[in-house]
Image (cartoon, helix red, strand yellow):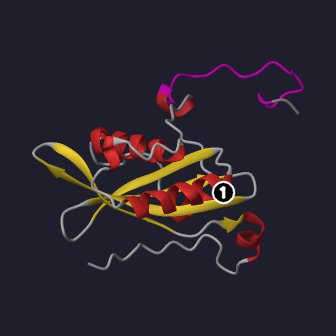
């Protein structure tokens, strides 16, 4: 039986009652991997694009092993070296950055994930605006986890926010 209730295979013409937006919805879609649940919704979210872009630039500098980047100046060199060593061990292929979260002390944090072929590194970057300029306040990075081990985990995508100790 055809769409029009007869044996005629000609499609039924649209009668014009359904709005165009329903017939052809427009979506702005970021490709999500199941593991992205661990860092939240991708992209800047409800916050301005400026802190998100700044966080991406800082994390890209780390990915490119730029130890002398002026963006990283507030951080201790031991922290920078540690994170760069972890990233290099991954042979990173992709960087994923989640949505911004405002912390109780007024800084903004972004959860991030560096993806390698066989492992991933998850962490958080904390930013604070000073005189209308964004500065890195802190970066926390877990040890790289093997992707095979993550898939065997009972709650592989459980996300818990990071706690900073001052």
Residue 89 sits inside the magenta stretch: no
Image point 36% across, 48% down: which residue? 45
Residue 12 percent coordinates (x, y):
71, 22
Residue 138 percent coordinates (x, y):
33, 62
Residue 41 percent coordinates (x, y):
47, 54
Q: Place residue 6 in its image quadrant.
A: top right
Question: Relative to 1, is 162 above or below?
Answer: below
Residue 153 percent coordinates (x, y):
71, 78
- Residue 46 is at least partly visible in this image: yes
State which region is magenta.
3-20
Image point 45% across, 54% down: which residue? 98
Image quadrant in which the C terminus is located = bottom left
* Relative depth, front residue between 62 and 17: 62
Image point 58% across, 54% down: which residue? 87
Residue on which disc 1 sits: 89
What SS does tag 1 mark?
helix
- Residue 19 is at least partly visible in this image: no
Image point 18% across, 63% down: which residue? 106
In the picture, measured across the screen, residue 3 lies left or right of residue 79, that is right
Numbered-mark total: 1
* Relative depth, front residue between 38 and 107: 107
Residue 9 sits inside the magenta stretch: yes
In the picture, measured across the screen, residue 34 lies left or right of residue 9, that is left
Q: Place residue 131 in its image quadrant.
A: top left
Image quadrant in which the N terminus is located = top right
């Amino acid at each position: 039986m055809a769409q029009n209730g007869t044996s005629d295979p000609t499609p039924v013409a649209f009668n014009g009652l359904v709005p165009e937006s329903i017939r052809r919805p427009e979506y702005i879609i970021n490709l999500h991997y199941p593991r992205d649940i661990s860092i939240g919704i991708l992209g800047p979210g409800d916050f301005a694009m400026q802190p998100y872009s700044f966080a991406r630039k800082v994390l890209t500098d780390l990915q490119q092993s730029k130890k002398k980047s002026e963006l990283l100046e507030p951080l201790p060199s031991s922290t920078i070296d540690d994170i760069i060593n972890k990233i290099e061990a991954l042979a990173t292929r992709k960087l994923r950055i989640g949505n911004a979260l405002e912390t109780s002390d007024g800084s903004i944090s972004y959860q991030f994930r560096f993806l390698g072929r066989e492992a991933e590194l998850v962490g958080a970057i904390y930013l604070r605006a000073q005189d209308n300029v964004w500065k890195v306040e802190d970066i926390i990075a877990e040890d790289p986890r093997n992707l095979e081990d993550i898939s065997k985990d009972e709650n592989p995508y459980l996300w818990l926010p990071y706690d900073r100790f001052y």
